[in-house]
Amino acid sequence: MAPSVVSFAGLSLDTSRIMGVINVTPDSFSDGGEVFACKDAVARGRAMIKAGADILDIGGESTRPGSGEISIAEELRRVLPVIEALADSGAQLSIDTRHAEVMTRAIAAGAHIVNDITALTGDPAALQTVSDLGCPVVLMHMQGEPGTMQENPTYSDAPTDIRDYLQQRIDVCLKAGIEKSRIAIDPGIGFGKTVTHNLQLLNRIDALHGLGCAVVLGVSRKRFIGTLTGAAEPQARLPGSLAAVVYARTRGVQIFRVHDVAETRQALVLCDHIQSVTKMQGGDHDKR
């Protein structure tokens, strides 16, 4: 199914969009500790914008498999200075959190988008908070909690079950006064899914377009890529990440949450150009 959504968070979706990951944490699975200092996180954010990021996704709590919670005070201490420093960067800023207070404080500090791995179920106040804030929101699917989600994830049919869950969350948001134009959806690759579940989701990801929302995909450096390819270190999984991104783009996914912005941008630019060509113009094949 072809996507029908034309924009999200003020960004036109007639071209692919990149959400750069900034984990202000000591323990995230891929880049934990690399930008734990505010100045390092801000520098990475500005470098990502220069490399082609449209959105910067700033998170202060690791949600890797097996991770534990931190206090809201600590999460705020980590993310607010980074948001404030990047508020004038020209990119859309997303706050990656499941806590209503963090959402509120982050938007007040200059963030534009809420990105919630619990689809606004992790905090009883989150749904009304996003409705009141009037900001765009990314609803992600996760089975279980980060600490236990990979122990035994089970589905009748993963793509169908996850699509149905996201439809239910969209319906709840609509009833709470959150317009569909403000909602994007993320199937949550690696969040309570086996390797097979992840592959099934990617293979049938175009089915999500029927929900009428922008689709966000976060596949960058995920563990299943290492399992399938033997790339043990997250930083070594770039080729596999790019393969998944390009495949998903051919299935209409519009927004990609990634660690490697420049490389992903180059792959997506080429993918978009290939898809846009209806016929080869005379002589174009010689312009290498």
Image (cartoon, grey):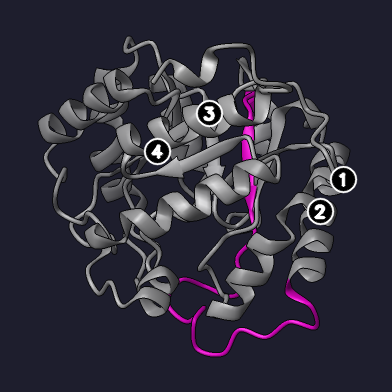
Residue 67 drawn at (x, y percent)? 34, 71
- Position of residue 218 in the picture relative to residue 43 (left or right): right
Q: For this rendering, which residue is in front, 203 or 174?
A: 203
Q: CA distance from mark 1 to mark 2?
A: 6 Å
Looking at the image, tell me whether mark 2 or mark 3 is earlier in sequence order: 3
Looking at the rendering, the stretch of residues picked out in magenta corresponds to 133-158
Which amino acid type corresponds to the residue marked 3 in the rendered image?
Arg
Looking at the image, tell me whether mark 4 or mark 1 is earlier in sequence order: 1
- Quadrant of the rendered image containing residue 63: bottom left
Indicate the secondary structure of the residue bearing disc 2.
helix
- Quadrant of the rendered image containing residue 109: top left
Q: CA distance from mark 1 to mark 3?
A: 20 Å
Asked if residue 148 lies in the magenta stretch, the reply is yes
Count up the numbered dots: 4
Point 59% across, 70% down: residue? 198
In this figure, which residue is indicated by the disc labeled 2?
Answer: 207
In this figure, which residue is indicated by the disc labeled 1?
Answer: 210
For the residues bearing labels 1 and 2, Cβ distance under 8 angstroms: yes
- The tag on residue 17 is 3
Which amino acid type corresponds to the residue marked 4 in the rendered image?
Thr
Tell me: residue 48, above or below residue 287. below
Which amino acid type corresponds to the residue marked 2 in the rendered image?
Ala
Residue 238 drawn at (x, y percent)? 32, 54
In this figure, which residue is indicated by the disc labeled 4?
Answer: 264
- Position of residue 249 in the picture relative to residue 55 (left or right): right
Q: For this rendering, which residue is in front, 43 or 240?
A: 240
Q: For this rendering, which residue is in front, 146 or 275?
A: 275
For the residues bearing labels 2 and 3, Cβ distance under 8 angstroms: no
Indicate the secondary structure of the residue bearing disc 3.
strand
* Quadrant of the rendering where the N terminus is positioned: top right
